Image: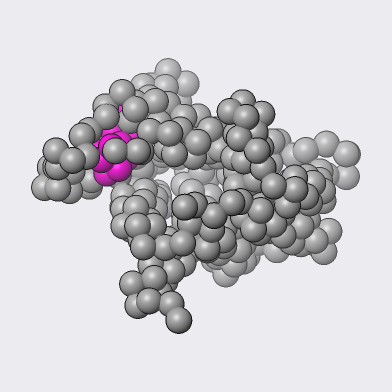
Amino acid sequence: MLKRTTLWADAALFLVAAIWGGAFVAQRLGAETTGALTFNGLRFAIGGAVLWPLVRLRRSERMPPSSAGGILLGILLFGGATAQQIGLAATTAGKAGFITGLYVILVPILLTLFWRESSAPLVWAGAAMAVGGLFLLSVGPAWRVETGDGWELLGTLFWAAHVIAVGKLVQNRDPLHLAMVQFLTCALLSLAAARLVEEPSLADLARAPGAVAYAGFLSTAGAYTLQTIAQRYADPARAGLILSSESLFAALFGFLFLGERLTARQALGAGLILGGIIAAQAGKPARK
């Protein structure tokens, strides 16, 4: 029988997945009125500001801060978030959610290719399923990947690199401090780039205050903090499976709030991607 703390952790991770799934809807709405860089700059500035007092309150000598590591994570986060937000202006929240979920498969593959960490056969089988699913989901009648989906796929490479970097940097470091620094780094990079390539205005932001607030407070600061706490008590493999439901929540909320629908072909592709994610998680060795 699962312990009460484990059940609580699983429930918390489902909530995290639901919040992140809903963030695709918020980001899709934000993309209609606000430049990608401006939106992300505000979103991550809010996230960093919310975490600031928490980091100050729980400062511990046993978990020293790592500003350099946080800056590196912020650069990777900037790449992933920028590509994702640009893509959401030209694709649906549901498709973006399923494509983003591919990072679960890319992580063990990249670890095998660049760090010589072996992956189980199920991981490679999951990767093959996901590639087939991506083709059905994203390749249009002209036999090419749609522009928005291409941006989402590029973002997935950054998300996978970000996950690997977190795993390498979080050992014996304060995770909330890392999160705060990476959010503020991403915010500064986004706002600096926005000054160069976009024309941000208060009028644009006034059209999507709810989207910015949701992405900043709930998705960035709230969900990340909850995930950090919950994963202390959750089985790593089960936690990965639960968090992969983010793509399902993205499709569900896209249908409920944006009226998005997948064709039968796209639904089959989404199913193959989800199956590949589950297979990849099942193929990961359990932590000791």
Q: Quick check: is 34 in the magenta stretch?
A: no
Identify the residue shown where x is 65% and y is 45%: 105
Say if the magenta span includes residue 174.
yes
Farthest-out residue, right: 142
- Which secondary structure type mostly characterizes the magenta part of the structure? helix
In this view of the protein, which residue sits in the foreground, 270 or 242? 242
Residue 268 is drawn in which quadrant? Answer: bottom right
Magenta segment boundaries in residue numbering: 173-185
Rendered image quadrant of residue 250: bottom right
Q: Is residue 158 above or below residue 120?
A: above
Label total for image? 0
Q: Is residue 193 visible?
A: yes
Residue at 33% x, 30% y is 70
Colour setting: one colour
Q: Residue at x 62, y 41 (%)?
A: 108
Residue 201 in the image, given as x and y percentages of width and height: 36, 34
Is 223 placed left or right of 130 in the picture? Answer: left
> At 61% from the left edge and 26% from the top edge, which residue is drawn?
114
Query: Which one is in front, 12 or 1?
Result: 1
Quadrant for residue 89, please give it: top right
Q: Quadrant of the N terminus?
A: bottom left
